[in-house]
Image: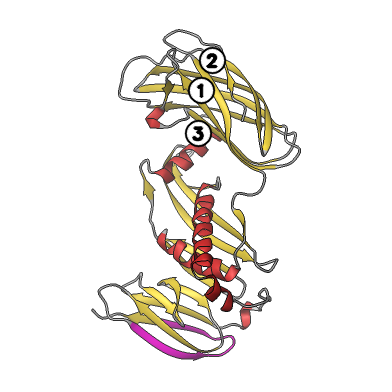
Amino acid sequence: MFMVMVAPMCGVDSPTRRVAVEITHEKGSFSGQLSVSLNGSMSKAKVEWNATIRNTSPRKIFRVTFCVKAFDAADQQIKPGGNECVLTLWGSNWEAAVPLNFKGKQNIRISDDKTPVQVAKYTIAATEVFDHSPNLRHLDVRCLLVWSSALRVFADKKFRPTVMDKDSFTATYAYDGGRIDGYSDAKQVLKAFTNANMAFMGPTWESFRIDAASLYLREERLGTCTAEIRMSFAGFGKPFMGSLGWYAVESNFSFEKALLDQLEAQSKHAASADMDKAISQLPTEAPKPVESAAKPQLTITSEPTGAEIEIDDEFIGNAPTTVTVKEGSVVVKVKKSGFQPWERTLKLNPGDKRTLNAELVK
């Protein structure tokens, strides 16, 4: 990774400085120029930037993150809120030889100290480069094990399945974590996205929500699984010349990547925990496409909501949810801490659409 520095300079305020960008990363290269200034006091500083950077890689870059750092005359790093970067820029779906422009300004709080900011140098580096889509992962694990691991991973992150099709390894989820306010880690992700890639007139998010998530697994080659996670977001804010409200926000893949990291770790752990047993229970061929319209569907709700659902002793998710199941006899169990288990056995025919409501008793 190549880092670019400007010569030290003195003064209370930092005039706009031009930084030549010549970055070589193992997965891509970038060239251009960044103009940046950081003025004000440590408790109330303003950073302004204008950059034109070209993707000099021979191929498309799906995502890249640039980190701009600032240092004082004593070579001590200036960290707003403890963060390494005073400015984070990122681009996605960046075609080869195409330039991107990054322009904007924002107020930042470095510390409670009211002394003036004194910047002596800036550095810029590419901290993360994806030459493939970061919401896609190739795993050396069978899709059946990845599917089982995903049920728990999504449930732990407060995602509730709404539709599940085990035959095609496809699932959609609703998020039960609610609206996220304040400066949580998740909020910072969207905050960085807005500030880095929109001009100063772009919206400032007060909060955001996750609208939906989808999981797609494909076993194109026996013994490996391609996992893809897609998520959609909405931010609550007021854009320039607009009204306060909810607006669709493009994913920057940070959430998808975090879920895939956990899914990969859980899947590999499941495969190694009892390899002989896992292999003996897996099919020897990749799943064949099945017409979803012909398969029975179960919609399962619970009173109270949020109970865990098991079908034929396999954890499915939390109620309410709709799941595609096999034909014939199935055993549905609904459990919630503090309540007696609820169980039903039913026979399903092709095309059936049934609804079960589990009224749990303490």
Q: Decide if residue 287 is on the left or right side of residue 207.
A: right
CA–CA distance in space, label 2 to label 3: 18 Å
Q: In this view, does 77 lie above or below 333?
A: above
Name the residue furthest top: 10
> Where in the figure is residue 261, as x and y percent of width and height?
52, 53
- Does 291 appear in magenta? no
Q: What residue type is labelled 3?
A: Asn
Q: Disc 2 vs disc 3: Cβ atoms closer than 8 Å?
A: no
Above or below 266: residue 281: below
Q: Residue furthest left?
A: 362
Name the residue: 59% across, 30% down: 102
Secondary structure mostly seen in the magenta stretch: strand
- Label 1 environment density (alpha carbons within 10 Å; few <14, some 14–19, many ≥20): some
Q: Can residue 241 be seen in this view?
A: no
- The quadrant in which residue 75 appears is top left
Quadrant for the N terminus in the image: top right
Q: Give the range drawn in magenta.
A: 342-356
Foreground pick, 164 / 272: 272
The residue at which mark 1 appears reads as: 48
Report if the CB atoms under discs 2 and 1 are less than 8 Å apart.
Answer: yes
In the picture, the quarter occupied by the C terminus is: bottom left
For marks 2 and 1, the one nearer the N-term is 2
Q: In the structure shown, which secondary structural element does the residue marked by tag 3 occupy?
A: helix
Pointer 3 with pointer 1, Cβ within 8 A: no
List x then y, in percent, for residue 272.
Answer: 52, 65
Disc 2: which residue: 16
Mark closest to the chain's N terminus, 2 or 3: 2
Q: Mark 2 is on which residue type?
A: Thr
